[in-house]
Each structure stands twice: as structure tokens, then as C-alpha cells.
Amino acid sequence: MRNAGEEQEVAADAPVEASSPEQQQAAEGAETGDLSLEEQLERAREESRQNQERYLRAIADWENFRRRTVREKDELRQHVIGGLLEDFLPVLDNLELGLQTAANHPEAENVAKGFALVAEQIRSVLERHGLTEIQAEGQVFDPHAHESLSYQPHDEIEEGRIVQVIRKGYALNGRLLRAAAVVVSSGPAADDKKDGETESAAQHDDEEGEDRGKNES
């Protein structure tokens, strides 16, 4: 025979049955029944507000995820295209150099025209992908877009402007891909400056002499 202690121990070890959805609804109904109509309406409004906030947060999280995914995809595409085009630029340089050399050989004129068309097609394809040539010749030297190889005196181009482009520079969708290698003007030669200063000084002396002659007379 089991004593009372054993029966209590068995009852304590017995699993507690979970309440069914019907029982939960009944419990909520009983709880709601204790509330007034205004309190029930206020509770419904609060639940609706919370659901609306959760919905808006979910929409915002999804929109942020979508934008971040698009941005990362575009950055990856730009990185891949940039690396490919940067490796391809020396090929384009050599093609243009070959065309310049062929221009000095009339017997290769027809072949040069064919390669010129190919070079134009290549430039067109690269431009569709956002590649643009940096205009440098005659421009003011910009260290963010130009790479100075040397300085050269020039009588007609003022100091700080680009005299010659040694290697073209390119940008990809507004971002510098390769700086233009250039020669920059250092202004008139030193001898020209001295001659100009001497001539100016002589002219000044002549003017002073004329003034003195007028005063003495």
C-alpha cells in the first residue's frame, strides 16, 4: 500500500498539461469581461498601435537591407570594372602609340585606318562603362588628377600650366583611375627674365634722363 507521502510525491512529478488555445481564449475572455467597454477599446487601440510600429520597423529594416545590398553590389561591380580597366589601359596606350607611328608611314595608311576604327570602338565601350579621359594639356596643374614628370621653361605658357601630356589619365565614374603624366611649364627661361628686367631697367633710366634734361632746361 502507498502511504500519503508517496501519493503526494507522484502527484508532484506528474506533468502539467498545457492549456489549449480554447482555454487561453476563455481566460482572456474572462479577463476582458472584467473590463469596461472603454478599457477594452483602449486596449485594442494600444495593440493596434504596437502592431503598426512593428510593421513600420519591419518595412524600414527591409528597405535598409535592400539599399545596403544594392550599394554593396554596385561597389563590388565598380571595383571589378576598375581593376579590369586599369589593367587594360596600357593596351589602349600601346594601340594609340602604334597609330601615331603609323601616321608617319603612308604605305600603312589603310591598315592604320582599320586599327583607328578598332580603337574608337574600344573607347566607346569603355565610355559606356563610365571611363572618361582627363583633359590635361593647357590646364592648370592639379596634383589630384595630374602627375608631374618634369618642369620645362616656356615663353608662351604661363608657369603652373601643363605643356605636354606624356601619358593620358582616366577617371571611372568621377573617381580617379589613373593620373595623367604631364610636363609642367616653369614660365619663361631665366635668360628671358633677365633680358626683360635689363630692358625694363634701361627704359626706366632713359625716362629718368629725359626728366632730368627737362628740369635742367
Image (cartoon, rainbow, N blue to C red):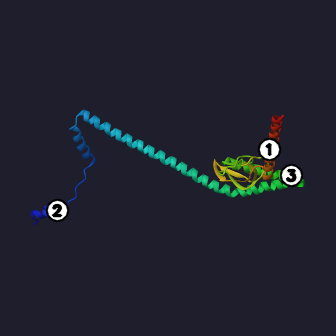
- Nearer the N terminus, badge 3 or badge 1? 3
> Horizontally, is 72 left or right of 155 in the view?
left
Tell me if mark 3 has few (under 14), some (14-19) or many (20+) residues whose alpha carbon lies within 10 angstroms of its own: few
Q: Residue furthest top?
A: 38
Of residue 164 and residue 211, the one placed in the foreground of this image is: 211
Is residue 151 toward the left or the right of residue 109 in the image? Answer: left
Q: Which element type, helix, strand or loop, lies under badge 3? A: helix
**Residue hosting label 3:** 110
**C-alpha separation, residue under disc 1 versus residue under disc 2:** 121 Å
Please, what secondary structure does the residue beneath circle 2 have? helix
According to the picture, the residue beneath numbered tag 1 turns out to be: 200
Q: Earlier in the sequence, mark 3 or mark 2?
A: 2
Q: What is the x, y in percent for residue 215?
A: 81, 35
The residue positioned farthest toward the front in the image shown: 216
- Distance between the alpha carbons at the discs numbered 3 and 1: 56 Å
Q: Tell me which amino acid carries mark 2.
A: Val
Q: Residue 9 appears in which quarter of the rendering?
A: bottom left
Residue type at mark 3? Answer: Asn
- Chain-order first, disc 1 or disc 2: 2
Point 41% across, 44% down: residue: 57
Q: Of the numbered discs in the image, which one, if any, rests on residue 143?
A: none
For the C terminus, which image quadrant? top right
Q: Position of residue 111 (x, y in %)?
A: 85, 54
Q: Amino acid at mark 1?
A: Ser
Residue 10 got which mark?
A: 2
